[in-house]
Image: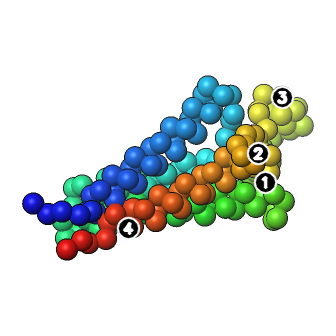
Amino acid sequence: MRRGRTYRQGALLVIAGSAALLGGAFAFQIFGGLAPCELCVWQRWAHGGAIASAMVAFVLPRRLGWIGLGLGVLGLVASAGIAVFHVGVEQTWWQGLASCGGSSGPAASVADLLAQLEVAPVVRCGDAAWSFLGLSMAAWNALISAALALAAVLFGRRQA
């Protein structure tokens, strides 16, 4: 029996960690009433990609399993990178995206525009809706995603 950490344990860490972060984000949305902004949605997509990619590690042969783990780690790094950008927008270190203002697209007329504005919730990327210990959700996502990526790489290293 081989001892030590394996790429599958690293992949499992990516899957469990990203699933927990996604679950937390959806819980804040569903139970806490905190609608996500555009950058929050992008971070969720990156976690979804991390989960799907890490699952590949379980179906590939052992000598290729590192590919699935590597793609899962890249998903975590992407989420952390988007989150760092999001924190910068929240802290006004730089400007956010044009889509971060809550616009729902072009309207055919002024009346259509007013109707869109009345029903569309405006979720600005620069407004942190929740924070804990002085860190926003985006900051926590950046820290946890980066830590998970590092841990998954360490778990995925070949152990003799």
Residues at marks 1 and 3, CA–CA distance in whole angstroms? 25 Å
Residue type beneath disc 4: Leu
- Residue 125 screen position, x and y as percent: 75, 49
If you read the primary sequence from the N terminus, does the residue marked by circle 4 or circle 2 appear first?
A: 2
Q: Of helix, strand and loop, which one carries label 4?
A: helix
Picture residue at 60% right of the left edge, 52% below the top? 141
Q: Is residue 52 visible?
A: no
* 88 displayed left or right of 17: right
Q: Which numbered disc, 1 or 3, marks the residue closer to the eye?
A: 1
Residues at marks 2 and 3, CA–CA distance in whole angstroms? 22 Å
- Residue 95 screen position, x and y as percent: 81, 62
Query: Which residue carries the number 2 mark?
Result: 128
Query: Which residue carries the number 1 mark?
Result: 90
Q: Of helix, strand and loop, which one carries label 2?
A: loop
Q: Which numbered disc, 2 or 3, marks the residue closer to the eye?
A: 2
If you read the primary sequence from the N terminus, does the residue marked by circle 1 or circle 3 appear first?
A: 1
Query: Which residue carries the number 3 mark?
Result: 118
Disc assigned to residue 153 = none
If you read the primary sequence from the N terminus, does the residue marked by circle 4 or circle 3 appear first?
A: 3
